[in-house]
Image (cartoon, grey):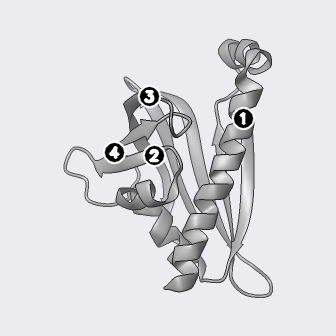
Amino acid sequence: MRAAVTVHMECPPEKAWELVSDITRMGEYSPEVVEAEWLGGATGPAVGARYRGHVRRNENWPLLYWTTCEITECVPGEVFEFAVVMGNRPVNTWRYEFRAAPGGGTDVTESFDLGDNLFTKLWRPLGGVLRERRNERDMRTTLERVKAVAERS
């Protein structure tokens, strides 16, 4: 199960990357992430760095929980990727790609990938497709909020 959304931003790729990769600001952008904090002495984005995100599923649902995430790819101005991990096992990968647009600005793509496994094959027709649509809507909201900050700066 996977999906992706792209939003154009009138800023250089490095600026959009800087905003997205500052996980301490994700609560400003994401409809579901309330806050995030670095773990284990990490102070910024780097492959292998871990952080935890405080998540409120579906924005107003009473369930509030922490997820642990590990950065798996990190190239300033190009890509920021992390996996949500349970123990040391990745269960969901989130990725942001930054591409300079031909006419100026940056096309930013956010995606998630739960993989193709028995769980996702069973879950998708039983309600996972609704979650997929929700993620697409939330990814667009997140990118639009980043865009507003990037273009205001």
Q: Where on the picture, by quarter, is residue 100?
A: bottom right
Q: Is residue 108 above or below residue 51?
A: below
Per the model, the C-alpha gap separating discs 2 and 3 is 13 Å
Which kind of residue does numbered mark 2 sit on?
Val
Query: Which of marks 3 and 1 precedes in the sequence?
Result: 3
Which kind of residue does numbered mark 3 sit on?
Pro
Mark 4 neighbour density, 10 Å: few (under 14) some (14–19) many (20 or more): many
Q: Which residue is mark 3?
A: 62
Q: Which residue is mark 2?
A: 33
Q: Which residue is mark 4?
A: 51
Look at discs 2 and 3 and give the one toward the viewer: 3
Q: Which residue is mark 1?
A: 132
Which kind of residue does numbered mark 1 sit on?
Glu
Secondary structure beneath dot 2 equals strand
Which kind of residue does numbered mark 4 sit on?
Tyr
Secondary structure beneath dot 4 equals strand
Look at discs 4 and 3 and give the one toward the viewer: 3
Q: Are marks 4 and 3 in contact (CB under 8 Å)?
A: no
Whether residue 68 is visible to the viewer of this picture, yes or no, is yes
Query: Which of marks 3 and 2 precedes in the sequence?
Result: 2
Residue, x 57% and y 65% (percent of image)? Answer: 145
Look at discs 1 and 3 and give the one toward the viewer: 3
Which quarter of the rendering shows the N terminus?
top right
